[in-house]
Image (cartoon, coloured by chain):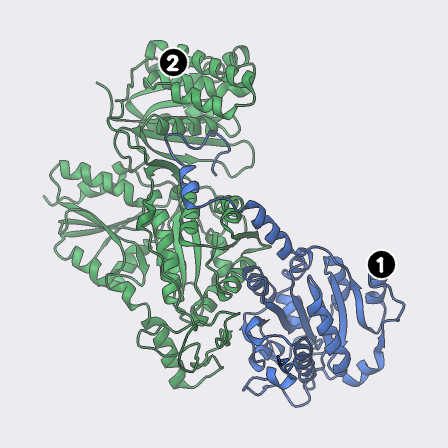
Amino acid sequence: MSTVPAKRKPSDYKSELKPIWCPGCGDFGVLASLYRAFAELDLDPANTVVVSGIGCSSRLPGFVSTYGFHSLHGRPLPVAMGVKLANPDLNVIAVGGDGDGFAIGAGHFPHAARRNVDITYLVMDNEIYGLTKGQVSPTSLTDQKAPSTPWGNLETPLNTLAFAVASGASFVARGASFNTKALTELIVQAMEHKGFSYIDALSPCVMFNNHQEEWKELVTDVAPDHDVADKTAAFDLALKGGFKMGILYREQRATINEKYAALVEAAKDSDLETMLEAFNARKGAAIGKPTV
Amino acid sequence: MARKSVVIRLAGESGEGVISSGDILTQAAARGGYWTQTFRTYPAEIKGGPCMYQVRMGEERIYSHGKDVDLLVCFNQEAWDLHWDSLGPDGVILFDETAVDIPEEYAARARPVRMEKLAKEIGGSLRAKNMVAVGAVAGVISFNTTPIEELVLRRYAHKQGVADANIAALRAGGDESADLRGSLAITDPVEVEADRILMSGNQAIAVGAIAAGVKYFAGYPITPASDILEWLSAKLPQVGGITIQCEDEIASISSVLGASYAGVKSMTATSGPGLSLMTEMLGYAGTAEIPCVVIDAQRGGPSTGLPTKTEQSDLQHALYGGHGEAPRVVIAPITVEDCFWATIDAFNYSERYQVPVILLTDQGLATRMEVIHKPDTDLIELWDRRTSAGLDREYKRYELTEDSISPMGIPGEEGGQYVSTGIEHDELGHPAYTPENHVAMQTKRWAKLEPLKNGIVRHEHYGEEQPEIAIIGFGSTYGAVREAIDLARAEGASVGAFYPRVLGPFPGEQVTAFAAKARRVVVPEVNFTGQLARLVRGECGIPVESHAKCDGLPFTAEDVLDVIMERIPS
């Protein structure tokens, strides 16, 4: 009689490092949701990579017992892309904060989205720079006073969900650290999604920007009859006031991983000797395109 | 008497066929059994602007592009104005009779060629102008046009009419220079091996990377490195790899590290401005001990500088650029052939020592075409990284081992799990900031590179081993220096050169030993501040004379010869 191996538990994904976050930090809820989602998906830790940038939230890979890549400010997406393209069999999730992802790393976001790299990107959005002690971030509210904006923030917050839809992300969702059940479910769906999935997770900073109670007032679920395939409807939800929770947009289209796999499969027909022979001075390269 | 080698310079407006004429001549020369080396300058404009293509060909191996021009071909007046003073004492000029006025005193050496007229009348299109020019050149140097005609037939295999028109233009060009036929005759190649290939430095690097087993390349277009990206885009999938054009250089190097972390050999290629952007991630690679190869095809700086001109001014940036002190290896190939082998070395060092390797070429070496020996692929030896597979002890990513190289876990591998980080970490990879730990980890990261200093790496020695005049150089200046040494030794000078392939870590002991008995040590390099000279002074503590120049052009053998002869002890 064969035995069915026991499914992994959320605690199986806990590393020996204790999170260094402040007591009450929203990121604990996100981490708990991640453990649960991994357990629900029963991910093989040896086949899973958590990539991050820099910041409080980006310390997360250290607290997860899988492979991890704690990269540099703003760089989780290209790193995650390299990992996934090098080995498409891996489960790859990139995590980070709003400053990491949408200030220094903003240049990478639309390209990961439009390429439809088959990874999940989970942003812990606290609308502030926590690790550097409270300066405004790209998602901070206008007029907010902070150490770097003593006269009030002059800028308009970036609407990351609208940005994600506009960039061509094939899965766009919002969750919150204070609703781990729903967030767990979103992470599961995002990781099951073939393509670039983006989750904005509201995750209050209790030290420098504690909006938890206001946010709880502002969140409402996406209506059950919302058509997730309707891009215009997704924009409408993203642009509305308050926070629409759930999946705003989802589409299935070929991932860059699939496209490259097909390209390599179709192109694979050569070797080093053949390539060198093409340069043979006696019979080789025809006049053609200049080489510069 | 026929010449052993000849220097042909074609000059005109970009888009007039200068480059394609040069390419045809180079390829035909290679097919005809000659050794060649080319040099070109081109404008930074997309269309228009002066460009020049110089082909040096001869029966013996060519190491530099040559100084005095034997045959100058002027497509327009500007070409004459810009290049007349490069003409050698016996030089001959061919010029388009409708476009160029040659001063009276050169008339005896100049031959008008009806380039435009014949192109239209016989070639059927102005585009055949380059074939008229090539035909005229072939006549003057007594070059058998059969290989050229073969190339034309090959190129226009499906357009017989165009092929015929081009061949007619070629022959008409030959007739135009009939009265100069053979005036710069080149000797026929004596012995022609079948195993010669013609490629550029960039191509040699791209093929070398494939030889080394690269499976992931990410890059962002930048002159003069772009054709590595372009070539690998076409070829890497054919051997099962991926090439991706990223949104910027930071994404390129970041994804290269991601791919390497995931277990495949990975590379990017850029020029100075791109290397600047990659610097932070290179520091990460050094600290997190992730192998990767970065090609820097240097161009003129500073800033966006001289995009289409050559310079060797990224040496210090490559060696030291970045915050903190993160280890890396810097390699400089010296010829097109060496670009192939040095790229394999770069991957080998990178994999064995789990360290980023920067390979420094420059515009001159990256874009020149050279006939080289086809690399003997049986000689290729590949090194792989040490992984956690089959480890019979507790896995520690940054384990302090005897040789300071630690096993690297590869995602997908059971038991190798760790978190890569640029934060100072302990043996397990956990953040750790104690003084003892930082010292231990810095020591480990630098100690593992010690073998690279002490003789396992290739270097090039030319001329006398203990010379009176010692030349120390790096990279693309090698060919000119080598030729200059031959010329100087023929005059009785005691001179020799030492070219380290690995510049970081610097082989100070070997360089010091080489220069031990020299009365003068000279360091020629193509930059303003004498970066290598300072490095040699600092690493070896010996007095050296810097001979640095930064005019955007490579050294000629004659330039170096002057430097040597000035220093001959009286």
Q: Position of residue B477 (x, y in %)?
A: 31, 45
Q: Amino acid at mark 1?
A: Thr
Residue located beneath label 2 in the image: B111
* Chain containing the residue with disc 1: A
Q: Residue at x 47, y 35 (%)?
A: B42
Q: Give the vertical position of A200 relative to A230 (above or below).
A: below
Does residue B432 show up?
Answer: yes
- Residues packed near mark 1 inside 10 Å, few (<14), some (14 to 19) or many (20 plus): few
SS category of the residue bearing label 1: helix
Q: Residue furthest left?
A: B570
Chain in blue on the image: A
Quarter of the view holding residue B555: top left
Q: Residue at x 46, y 64 (%)?
A: B282
* Chain containing the residue with disc 2: B
Q: Amino acid at mark 2?
A: Arg
- Residue A185 falls left or right of residue B385: right
Residue sitting nearer the eye, A107 or B343: B343
